[in-house]
Image (cartoon, rainbow, N blue to C red):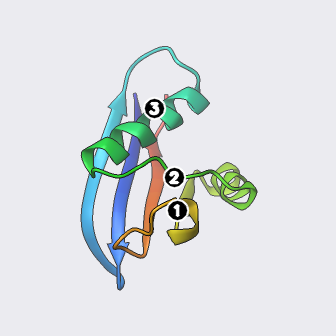
């Protein structure tokens, strides 16, 4: 099972969180993109833009943050964080 945890943080407080679970045969990259899309839909957000620094951070730590620079419209929170908490 693959699980991706998404959380919205503002002023060091957790506002919302959600865990996306996937048991399909998709590769890890597709599961991450699909999970991020599901999390954004649940939080009523647009999908963030993956910058090169975000990609490198996710590759190193299986975790990354999407700040105000990653969205077209400025969000009302400090950042959206995703983290892989379980992999097959």
Left or right, residue 28 beside residue 87 = right
Q: Position of residue 64 (x, y in %)?
A: 56, 59
How far apart marks 1 and 2 lie (CA) works out to: 7 Å
How far apart marks 1 and 3 lie (CA) works out to: 16 Å
Label 2 near label 1: C-beta < 8 Å?
Answer: yes
The residue shown at (58%, 22%) is 27
Q: Position of residue 86 (x, y in %)?
A: 44, 40
**Numbered label attached to residue 12:** none
Q: Residues within 10 Å of mark 2 (few under 14, many from 20)?
A: some
Which residue corresponds to mark 1?
66
Left or right, residue 41 beside residue 35 = left
Q: Position of residue 1 (x, y in %)?
A: 40, 27
Tag 1, which secondary structure? strand
Identify the residue at the far front of this view: 73
Q: Earlier in the sequence, mark 1 or mark 2?
A: 2
Which residue corresponds to mark 3?
34
The residue shown at (30%, 45%) is 19
Q: Nearer the viewer, mark 1 or mark 2?
A: 2
Out of 51 and 28, give the one closest to the viewer.
Answer: 51
Out of 80 and 62, give the one closest to the viewer.
Answer: 80
Give the total number of marks visible in the rendering.
3
Which residue corresponds to mark 2?
48
Identify the residue at the far top of this view: 25
The residue shown at (52%, 69%) is 67
Tag 2, which secondary structure? loop
Tag 3, which secondary structure? helix
């Amino acid at each position: 099972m693959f699980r991706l945890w998404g959380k919205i943080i503002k002023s060091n407080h957790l506002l919302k969180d959600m865990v996306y679970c996937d048991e399909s045969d998709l590769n890890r990259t597709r599961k991450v993109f699909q999970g991020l899309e599901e999390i954004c839909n649940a939080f009523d957000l647009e999908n963030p833009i993956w910058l090169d620094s975000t990609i490198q951070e996710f590759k190193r730590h299986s975790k990354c943050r999407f700040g105000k620079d990653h969205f077209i419209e400025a969000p009302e929170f400090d950042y959206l964080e995703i983290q892989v908490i379980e992999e097959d």
